[in-house]
Image (cartoon, rainbow, N blue to C red):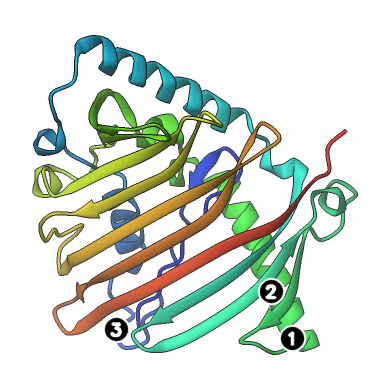
């Protein structure tokens, strides 16, 4: 079984990928983790989406997107408490959880994360302990592996932005991602698009998908990949609303990858001073 989970953390896009495979311990699973991570962060020009807009319109929209990125990056999510509902379907193996985050608890030296439910049931003491240990390990790994965290300005290569559509409420733009460490095999096989909401002046949605199969590493092949991030605008802060990923492919020729993961965030409360 192969498992993949992603998050957005604070003012960065955070993708902690977790792969489990019990049949072949010699397989380089860690390499596949990183490669699939990087695969989501490489996009190509989408000139086919571009319509006839004036240079002034394009420049104005690019400026709006830049300001929206700055607004997103200034949001300190560690000052907000929230609830996140997670759902995963890994080759038919379905799991779910409801978790709460409390930044004030973390600053006092306590556990910032609380497991409320797992697979629809109240967790046992052991499940709570295991959950807390896992969160501490993830926090430690996040500090040590800075290359896993990508700021929004890294995800969206601003000079590549092209206009798709403009109406009274939204601006839609296609973009390239400024990340090209996967090599020539992945170039031209992924694309991205964002939706900017005019009223609140923020990026409401980011979508990345593939337009052809790609191989992030030897023996791994991704046939379908779709990642969507949506956001709230609350009192000037831009906060994660939902992360969704769908991925299909194969690993080591005989292991199917067929995954869906969905994280939904709610109950935001500002806890800063």
Q: Tell me the residue at 28%/36% (across/down).
A: 179
Distance Cα–Cα, label 2 vs label 3:
26 Å
Horizontal side of 94 relative to 237 (left or right) equals left
What quarter of the picture does the N terminus occupy?
Answer: bottom left
* Residue for badge 2: 131
Give percent across and percent down for residue 118: 65, 83
What quarter of the picture does the C terminus occupy?
Answer: top right
Which mark sits nearer the N-terminus, 2 or 1? 1
Horizontal side of 80 relative to 189 (left or right) equals right
**Compared with residue 191, is residue 213 higher up or lower down, i.e. above or below?**
below
Residue count near mark 1 (Cα–Cα under 10 Å), binned few <14, some 14–19, many ≥20: some
Whether residue 143 is visible to the viewer of this picture, yes or no, is yes
Q: Tell me the number on the disc at residue 123.
A: 1
Q: Tell me the number on the disc at residue 24.
A: 3
Examine the image and state in which quarter residue 66 appears. top left
Examine the image and state in which quarter residue 132 appears. bottom right
Which mark sits nearer the N-terminus, 2 or 3? 3
């Amino acid at each position: 079984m192969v498992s993949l989970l992603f998050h957005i953390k604070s003012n960065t896009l955070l993708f902690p990928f977790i792969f489990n495979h019990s049949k072949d311990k010699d397989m380089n699973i860690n390499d596949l983790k990183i490669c699939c991570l990087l695969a989501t962060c490489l996009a190509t020009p989408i000139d086919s989406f571009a319509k006839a807009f004036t240079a002034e319109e394009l420049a104005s929209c690019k400026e709006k997107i830049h300001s929206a990125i700055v607004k997103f990056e200034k949001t300190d999510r560690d000052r907000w408490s929230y609830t996140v509902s997670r759902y995963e379907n890994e080759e038919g193996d379905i799991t779910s959880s409801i978790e709460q985050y409390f930044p004030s608890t973390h600053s006092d030296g306590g556990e910032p994360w609380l497991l409320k439910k797992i697979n629809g049931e109240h967790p046992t003491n052991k499940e709570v302990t295991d959950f807390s240990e896992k969160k501490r390990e993830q926090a430690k790994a996040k500090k040590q592996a800075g290359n896993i965290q990508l700021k929004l300005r890294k995800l969206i290569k601003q000079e590549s932005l092209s206009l798709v559509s403009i109406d009274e409420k939204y601006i839609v733009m296609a973009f390239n991602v400024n990340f090209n460490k996967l090599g020539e095999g992945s170039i031209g096989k992924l694309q991205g698009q964002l939706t900017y909401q005019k009223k609140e002046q923020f990026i409401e949605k980011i979508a990345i998908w593939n337009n052809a199969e790609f191989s992030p590493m030897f023996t791994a092949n991704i046939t379908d990949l779709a990642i969507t991030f949506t956001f709230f605008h609350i009192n000037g802060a831009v906060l994660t609303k939902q992360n969704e990923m769908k991925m299909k492919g194969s690993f080591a020729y005989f292991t199917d990858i067929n995954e869906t993961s969905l994280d939904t965030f709610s109950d935001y409360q500002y806890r800063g001073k």
